[in-house]
Amino acid sequence: MRVITVCVGSACHLKGSHDIINYFKEAIQNSGLEKQVELKGTFCMDHCTDGANLLIDDVLFHASSVDDARKIFEKEIIKKS
Ligand code: FES
């Protein structure tokens, strides 16, 4: 099981983490990966200036837009599933 954890702390929220979570939700469904990929939220991960921050498994990524999140999803989830 892969785990995507998106920071929903206030700094990351201001940088669009809510839209990024919605994107991941849709992308997981559209790829039929509901049983392989779990989506979670977390509070501040102490990297506020880099946000919006997310973890895939234990690796930290920064997505400054939904488009960045899409690229990360394609590279880290689709290509590795
Ligand atoms: S609010 Fe997301 S890392 Fe601090």
Image (cartoon, helix red, strand yellow):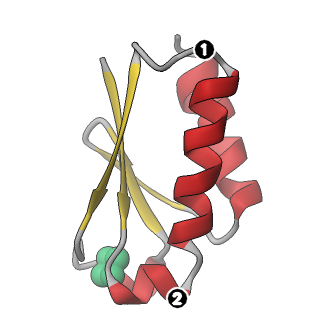
Looking at the image, is 28 positioned above or below residue 25? above
Q: Mark 2 points at which residue?
A: 14
Residue drawn at x 69%, y 68% as measured from the top left: 65
Residue drawn at x 65%, y 39% as measured from the top left: 26
Q: Which of 51 and 40 is in front in this view?
A: 40
The circle drawn on residue 32 is 1
**Residue 81 located left or right of residue 69:** left
Residue 70 placement (x, y as % from top left):
70, 45
Amino acid bearing label 2: Leu
Q: Which of 30 and 51 is in front in this view?
A: 30
Q: How far apart are marks 1 and 2 (CA)?
A: 29 Å
Of the residues tagged 1 and 2, which is closer to the observer? 1
Binning the other alpha carbons within 10 Å of mark 1 as few (below 14), some (14 to 19) or many (20 upward) gives few
Residue 53 placement (x, y as % from top left):
42, 66
Residue 6 placement (x, y as % from top left):
39, 58
Q: In which quarter of the image is the N terminus?
A: top left
Instruction: Name the element at disc 2.
Output: helix
Which quarter is ligand 1 in?
Answer: bottom left
Residue drawn at x 56%, y 82% as measured from the top left: 15
Looking at the image, is 74 positioned above or below residue 39? above
Residue drawn at x 47%, y 20% as measured from the top left: 34
Which circle's residue, 1 or 2, is located before the other in the chain?
2
Which quadrant of the figure has residue 79?
top right
Instruction: Name the element at disc 1.
Output: loop
**Residue 8 located left or right of residue 16:** left
Q: Which of 21 and 70 is in front in this view?
A: 21
